Image: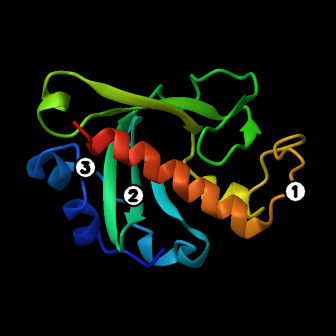
């Protein structure tokens, strides 16, 4: 993923108003993020831990999604599998995104179990340790695992943006 600016991220939101996008908290450490290892940029709002955000590059441009989840520390402690990167660990949470447009205004949403810290890219690459048994044995190459994660992220964003 190419490095993104705060302005690019705010303009990329597909399921909130421009005013909401303007008010949300963007990470201050964008310059220090490991962009070469990221297929998506995800973060939780430190001032409102039940809010999370995900930015995925699709067709050469960023698409950002506003999510809601359980506050940090309140999700289940049993091990679950992230539906994006297929990593199993205790920090997996149900993330729910309001759908884009009229459907979202009517209260429709899309949910998926994701790594609570939204660090799927780092788990897939082994840059972050999910703990014992976090990565199931697979015959796929690293590139194939990355491709699968990107496809899962793209499918989630597509569900958010389709009517």
**Which label number is shown at residue 139?**
1
Q: Residue at x 82, y 47 (%)?
A: 135
Q: CA distance from mark 3 to mark 2?
A: 14 Å
Residue situated in front as seen by the camera: 107 or 152: 152
Image quarter where the C terminus lies is top left
Instruction: Find residue 18 and report its horizontal and vertical position in percent.
Output: 11, 52
Task: Count up the numbered dots.
Answer: 3
Q: Residue at x 26, y 35 (%)?
A: 99
Residue under numbered circle 3: 24
Front of the two marks 1 and 3: 1
Front of the two marks 3 and 2: 2
Q: Is residue 32 left or right of residue 21?
A: right
Helix, strand or loop under label 3: loop
Q: CA distance from mark 1 to mark 2?
A: 28 Å
Q: Is residue 1 depicted above or below 88 in this figure?
A: below
Crowd rating for badge 3 (residues with CA inside 10 Å; few <14, some 14–19, many 20+): some
Residue 162, by quadrant, is top left
Asked if the residue under mark 2 is in contact with the one under mark 3, i.e. CB atoms within 8 Å, the reply is: no
Residue 46 shows in the view: no
Instruction: Find residue 107 and report its horizontal and vertical position in percent.
Output: 21, 21
Helix, strand or loop under label 2: strand
Residue under numbered circle 2: 55
Instruction: Find residue 61 and report its horizontal and vertical position in percent.
Output: 32, 71
Residue 101, by quadrant, is top left
Upstream in the sequence, badge 3 or badge 2?
A: 3
Q: CA distance from mark 1 to mark 3?
A: 40 Å
Q: Is residue 111 left or right of residue 122?
A: left
Crowd rating for badge 2 (residues with CA inside 10 Å; few <14, some 14–19, many 20+): many
């Amino acid at each position: 993923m190419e490095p993104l600016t705060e302005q690019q991220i705010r303009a990329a939101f597909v399921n909130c108003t421009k005013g909401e996008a303007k008010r949300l908290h963007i990470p201050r450490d964008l310059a220090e993020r490991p962009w070469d290892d990221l297929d998506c940029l995800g973060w939780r709002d430190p001032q409102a831990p039940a809010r999370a955000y995900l930015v995925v590059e699709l067709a050469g441009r960023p698409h950002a999604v506003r999510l809601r989840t359980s506050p940090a520390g309140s999700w289940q402690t049993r091990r679950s599998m992230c539906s994006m990167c297929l990593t199993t660990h205790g920090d997996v949470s149900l993330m729910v995104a309001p759908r884009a447009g009229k459907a979202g205004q009517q209260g429709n949403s899309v949910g998926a179990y994701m790594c609570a810290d939204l660090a799927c890219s780092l788990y897939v690459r082994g840059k972050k340790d999910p703990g014992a048994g976090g990565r199931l044995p697979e015959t796929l190459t690293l590139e194939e695992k990355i491709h699968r994660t990107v496809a899962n992220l793209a499918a989630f964003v597509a569900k958010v943006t389709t009517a």
